[in-house]
Amino acid sequence: MRPIWQHSGIFEKVPVRKATILKRKITPLLMISMLVLFTSFRQKEDLSQNDLSFKTIPERWDEAIPLGNGIIGALVWKKGEQLRFSLDRTDLWDLRPVENLSKPEFSYQWVKKQVDNDNYAKVQALFDQPYDQMPAPSKIPGAALEFNINQLGDVKETRLQIKDASATIKWVNGAELETFVHANQQQGWFRFTGVDNSFRPEIIPPEYQNTTNDSETNPVTGQDLQRLGYEQGQVMEAHQLLVYRQKGWNGFAYEVAVKWENNNGTCTGVWSISSTLSESKGEKRASNVVSVEKILPAYKRAYISHLSWWVSYWGKSTVNLPDTVLQKQYYLEMYKFGSVAKPDAPPISLQAVWTADNGKLPPWKGDFHHDLNTQLSYWPSYAGNHLDLEIGFVDWLWENRETFKAYTKTYFGTNGINVPGVTTLTGEPMGGWIQYSFGPTVGAWLAHHFYLHWIYSGDKEFLTNRAYPWIKDVAVYFEEISERDTFGKRKLPISSSPEIRNNDREAWFLETTNFDLALIRWTFQKAAELARETGEVQEAEKWERILSEWPELAISGEKGGLNIAPNVKYASSHRHFSHLLGWHPLGLIDWSNGLGDQEIIRNTLNDLEEVGSDWWVGYSFSWLANLYARAKMGDKAAETLRVFAENFCLPNSFHVNGEQNDKGLTNFKYRPFTLEGNFAFASGVQEMILQSHSGVIEIFPATPQSWQEVSFEKLRARGAVLVSAKREKENSIIVQLQSLNGGLVKMKNPFKDKGFKTKKENIKVKEDILEIYLEPNEIVVLLSD
């Protein structure tokens, strides 16, 4: 969205007397103008430049127009001659247990024994292979609505309108479709105009009893639905009402319903999906949800409340970039984030509310991958000022902590908490490559988000009741699982680095990898920090003592970059930058720490560039852009984000892992759709224009030299500070800071030797850092002199 300051006239030169830093004040009239600039009601924004627009209707499910609200979703596309809405719901899951995970061998210590005895094939047979061979547990698809559009002729335009999260299709003959998934009600709506009175939807169930007898077990391409063994559900019809109920495993069932009415060439309808899981929580069945009288007036009321939610969402923050490719992709990513993240929803899974509609189970079973995917998916929520949506992630983790503690006790034999790296909807382990699906540091990777929620919100209650207890439990687990090496330092019995060396025996390291070590060191560091914050001084001292008993991160003696493990350099192209976690996002190594860390960072980036991108996927480029931004390399960050947007995304903006344009960027040419690369892209943009991870706010820390004009409004910095800034030609800058909780705000001086004007008194300047004390919700505005 374009903030108010971009409207004509508001940023024209105002003749004011020159002022030196802090010694002269700007006039009261100008201060009023500045406050109006940042706090007045913003005019409606034209977001249409960031819409998706096509001259035809997409003809593949993964190129469809995506709509969603974090619980239900739809993909709008054309299948054959029919217009198709692929309908989905996040709790459509086959939750049958993995039997092998109840065997006595389900033990970290047993696995270590097989590693030591070089008998690893037994481990792979018990714990890796069932994930590929068994169809479930798995996310399952819902159903589809289809409409016969033969009579409508040629299409004029298909558009996703991100401002109101709606899809429209216009036909040459004047017929139109408007459709949306309500932002916070479990309903989808559609309205066709210019159709005859026989126009209607049909429910098309998934084919759980097809006759292909496909025995394919590839988790990437997806197994056939028939392998689930379901009895095919039936569609029942009443007057302008269709209901489909499908039974699943062990009493689970879900229902899809659609109701419509025809009136004077208009067909208006509402659809919904429910499940026995949602019904057990008091939600209505889908058939009851759609039981509304006078559908057309209900459609209009639903749209008004739906629009209200999206207006509020887009008002949380704005970004304006001079690069139109990055600008559009950023807004499409934030549109998708608003469509899949909600406070009352499960975490963002691999495909969230857009499960594959191709007659198969989704790629990687549509599960919750916690070795990278869920974590990256929430990166843009923090600076993007969407903690109200991110809270759903940590709430889900907290709600399932007893399941995670039981897993930790069973598999690792310790107290405290760890989390399976691959989980079902209810947090149960699913198996797979066990170095990562049962990884020893997953709980710490997820603890990072508890910390981020605290540090970006300043919510003391969350700190006391959620953040510190979770991190403390992880620290207890690490204390108990660790053992001593010959030098008396702590180590893990066996360690790994996702997904280095895949699932081979050699993927287990006998020395602690940088990935695991970074998470362990971060955990004890933050456990001590939060213990002191909550007044637990003795606990803080304990965590600091244990931290000192772990080694430092492994650095290459030859090149000086971060290693994968002690004496194991990054020497082969790999998609997962797991060995760099201590740098980004954990910040144990950081540019702000001075020349020593800067040299490590430069050498690490040199290693990545020299080894090359042959075996990277899309999210590798998104992550790399974040790394470049943290290293203050704005040109490289922007270039890398463009590579991602133009080569690893389909026309509807979906990240599909493999390269799509055959430019030789990587050897991966496949197209399994997952979301984490999209959201890491948005985070990369934010890192370029605002950073605060060091405790000091930096404005435009990594923007390309060519970006003469760039601005943002109400991005969030750590410490619960809302930041707005604009840079014009000749480096003229205006900054607004609003501290939501009050306190000392530190900002790197963006004005340098030019000086600045402000009405705020008592701003301290220490070297290049401005120290500003603000009361709760107090606003300060600073302008270039």
Image (cartoon, helix red, strand yellow):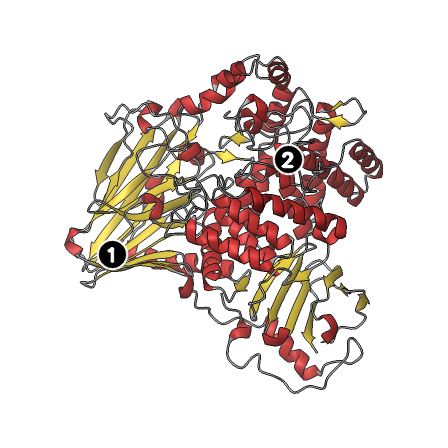
**Measured from the top left, where is residue 526 in percent x and y?**
73, 41
Q: Mark 1 — residue?
A: 192
**Measured from the top left, where is residue 449 in percent x and y?**
62, 43
Q: Residues within 10 Å of mark 2 (few under 14, many from 20)?
A: many
Residue 412 shown left or right of residue 330 in the figure: right
Q: Quadrant of the C terminus?
A: bottom right
The kind of residue tagged 1 is Phe
SS state under label 1: strand
The quarter holding residue 757 reads: bottom right
The kind of residue tagged 2 is Lys
**Could you tell me if residue 377 is visible in this image?**
yes
Q: How far is mark 1 from mark 2, CA to CA?
A: 60 Å
Sequence-earlier tag: 1 or 2: 1
Q: Residues within 10 Å of mark 1 (few under 14, many from 20)?
A: many
Q: Nearer the viewer, residue 317 or 183?
A: 317
SS state under label 2: loop
Report the mark closest to the observer, 1 or 2. Answer: 2
Q: Which mark is residue 233?
A: none
Residue visible at 50% across and 58% down?
313
Q: Mark 2 — residue?
A: 569
